[in-house]
Amino acid sequence: MRFEEQLTVPVAPAAAWDFLWQTRRVAACLPGCTAVEEIEPGRRYKAQFADAIGPYKAQFDLDVTVQETRPPERIRLQASGQDKRLGASQQVTLEVALRELAPRLTALDVTADVQILGKIAALGQFAIKRKARDVVQQFARNVAAELEAEAPSPPGRGPG
C-alpha cells in the first residue's frame, strides 16, 4: 500500500533537514512509536511500535535502516519487524523529499509504502489501508506542528 502526504512548513529546508535527524523528536511524531535507539547514528536504529489494528494489539520490534540520503533534499529509510505473539510482520519504506518554496518555506513530500502480513492481514486490505493511512497522515501533521513551533516569529510580532 502506498501513501503520499504533502505538507508545507514555515522553516528553511536546512532547518527541516536538521529536524529529520533529531531521532527522538521524529519518533515522537510517529503515532504508536514507543521507543527508539540509535545503533549507528545516521544509518541504523531500533524502534518499538505498538498500536491497535481492529481487534488486534500489535507490538512490533523494528529494525530501521537509512537507505539513501541527499542532504538537504531527500531521505529514504526502511523499517521492518515482527510481532511474534501475533505472527505478524510489517515492512515500511518511508521517503521524505524537501523542496524550498521560499527562503523560510519548505514543502515536505512524505511517501510511505507499507506491507503488513500475518494474522492482521485477515482484517482485509480496507481496514489495514485505513489504519496505515491514518498513521502516515498523523505523522505528517505532527512533523508540521513540531516545525511550526520552532519557526521564528515574523518581524514586529513578539510573544504575547
Image (cartoon, helix red, strand yellow):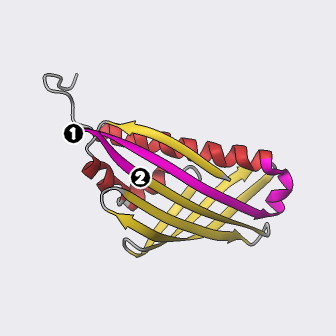
Neighbours of disc 1 within 10 Å: few (<14), some (14-19), many (20+): few
Work out whether residue 49 or residue 92 is closer to the camera in this orientation and state it: 92
- Left or right, 8 with reference to 47: left
Q: Residue 69 at x, y = what percent?
A: 38, 66
Q: Which residues are magenta?
A: 98-125
When the figure is inspected, residue 48 is found, relative to residue 158, above or below; the finding is below
Look at label 2 and name its amino acid: Ala
Please tell me the numbered disc located at residue 3. Answer: none
Work out whether residue 41 or residue 55 is closer to the camera in this orientation and state it: 41
Labels 2 and 1: the sequence-earlier one: 2
Neighbours of disc 2 within 10 Å: few (<14), some (14-19), many (20+): some
Q: Main secondary structure of the magenta part?
A: strand
Work out whether residue 52 or residue 141 is closer to the camera in this orientation and state it: 141
Residue shown at 71%/43% (left/top)? 130
According to the image, label 1 marks what residue?
Answer: 103
Residue shown at 51%/63% (left/top)? 35
Please tell me the numbered disc located at residue 97. Answer: 2
Q: Residue 137 at x, y = what percent?
A: 56, 42
Q: Residue 127 at x, y = what percent?
A: 78, 46
Work out whether residue 50 or residue 113 is closer to the camera in this orientation and state it: 113
Look at label 1 and name its amino acid: Pro
Quadrant position of residue 23: bottom left
Q: Residue 150 at x, y = what percent?
A: 28, 41
